[in-house]
Image (tube, rainbow, N blue to C red):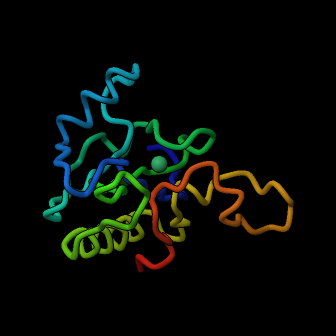
Amino acid sequence: MRKINLIVIHCSATREDQTFTEEDLERCHRSRGFKCTGYHFYIRKDGAIISTRNVGQIGAHARGYNANSIGVCYEGGLDCNGRPADTRTKQQKHSLHVLVVLLLEDYPGSRVCGHRDLSPDANGDGVIEPEEWLKVCPCFDASTIL
Ligand SMILES: [Zn+2]
């Protein structure tokens, strides 16, 4: 088993009024050349937690951080106008919390962060500020999950 010390949260960057199934996600990632979905878990709007890649396999979701991390993605991330927004349903918030708690039991001490928090620290002050985010994924503060 590979060493895991990081849990990275993502959004699918799909509109909240759009349905984007795990099959849609897999098709999308295969078309980008991945052998299956790049994330390990996908959380649907109804709160269903779907295992999309074996955690023993290195994911394809956060450049430079895949080797030691687990990628978790929720369905949504854009409002009805296509703008980035925290579109998590009540069920998604609950499932995200439960999943992260369980993963931390398996991989104690792991850091939990959002994809955006892995952006480079451009001004070197030790904090990744909003103006430094290369992308806004997952469109909410991942430190609020626990
Ligand atoms: Zn992401």
Q: Residue at x 73, y 51 (%)?
A: 120
Residue 44, position as x, y percentages in the image: 19, 56
In the image, residue 81 above or below residue 108: above
Residue 56, position as x, y percentages in the image: 38, 42
Residue 74, position as x, y percentages in the image: 31, 56
Quarter-of-image position of residue 105: bottom left
Residue 130, position as x, y percentages in the image: 65, 64
Q: Residue at x 28, y 73 (%)?
A: 93
Closer to the camera, 131 or 143?
131
Quarter-of-image position of residue 27: top left
Q: Residue at x 43, y 58 (%)?
A: 84
In the image, residue 51 above or below residue 138: above
In the image, residue 79 above or below residue 105: above
- In the rendered image, the quadrant that contains the N terminus is top left
Closer to the camera, 128 or 57?
128
Quarter-of-image position of residue 76: bottom left
Q: How many marks?
A: 0
- In the rendered image, the quadrant that contains the C terminus is bottom left
Q: Residue at x 17, y 35 (%)?
A: 23
Residue 49 located left or right of residue 118? left
Q: Looking at the image, which residue sits at the far right?
A: 124
Q: Looking at the image, which residue sits at the far front?
A: 81
Residue 118 located left or right of residue 32? right
